[in-house]
Amino acid sequence: MRHLVALGLLTIFALLVGPLALSGGETPRPLRIAAEQESVRVPVDTLFRLRLRQGLSSRTAQKGDIFTAEVIAPVVVGDVVAVPVGSLVTGRVTSVTRAARRRSGTIAVSFEELQLPSGRKYKIYGSLASLETPEGEKRQVGEEGEVKGGSSIKRDVVFIGGGAGVGAVIGAAAGGGKGAGVGAAVGAGLGTAAALLRKGTEVEVPSGTEIGMVLDRELILPRPR
């Protein structure tokens, strides 16, 4: 019983002395604010410019296949380079459709991990995106190297087979309402859209192809020192 009484007195003494010890004019830095200042938040819809390190083909790809891509333009938040050039993004094939008559092949992918040059890895949620605007113009890169994305970036896109070159391999996902239009545009590389309808084309995305990834969820990273 005496032990409990003594412990209670010490607790009361600590509560009384604590505020006096801080009366010298210095206020302790809130831990929550300190933590926020030591991190940078990369918002949803941020567009990453990537370069594939392995090729993808609907002839051989299988659901679950892993691939990597290198960040080729810094991702800047405010005045901070949150994701530097040379960072690696790991992706996964989520579905594959082989080419058939009247149907080109498709490959759908997602992005799951970011590795900074320091070697530290972070879970991400990213989707394939086009590096071009809906009007067909290349997305602008700001003075600090940031890729200027926007809420208009489509998430429901896949690699689609065609003969118009690697710049046209990204199309609307099946059922998205614009797949036919994209197919026609890709088919133009073969001469006419009808050529694509007569014989489907496999997806062939070679290593070194530049692609876009858009964040589906906010990403919190340590602030570079």
Image (cartoon, rainbow, N blue to C red):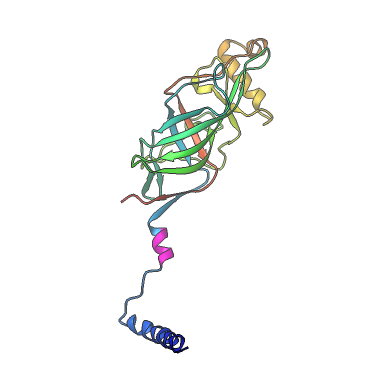
Front-most of 101 and 187? Answer: 101
- Total labels: the figure holds 0
Magenta segment: does it hold 41?
Answer: no
For residue 222, side relative to residue 187 (left or right): left
Q: Position of residue 163 (x, y in %)?
A: 55, 14
Q: Residue at x 39, y 62 (%)?
A: 34
Q: Position of residue 211 (x, y in %)?
A: 48, 29
Residue 108 quadrant: top right
23 relative to 219, above or below: below
Residue 21 quadrant: bottom left
Q: Residue at x 35, y 35 (%)?
A: 86
Mark yes or no: residue 39 visible: yes
Span colored in magenta = 31-36
Q: Position of residue 90 (x, y in %)?
A: 46, 34
Q: Position of residue 76 (x, y in %)?
A: 40, 45
Mark yes or no: residue 147 visible: no
**Main structural element of the magenta stretch: helix, strand or loop?**
helix
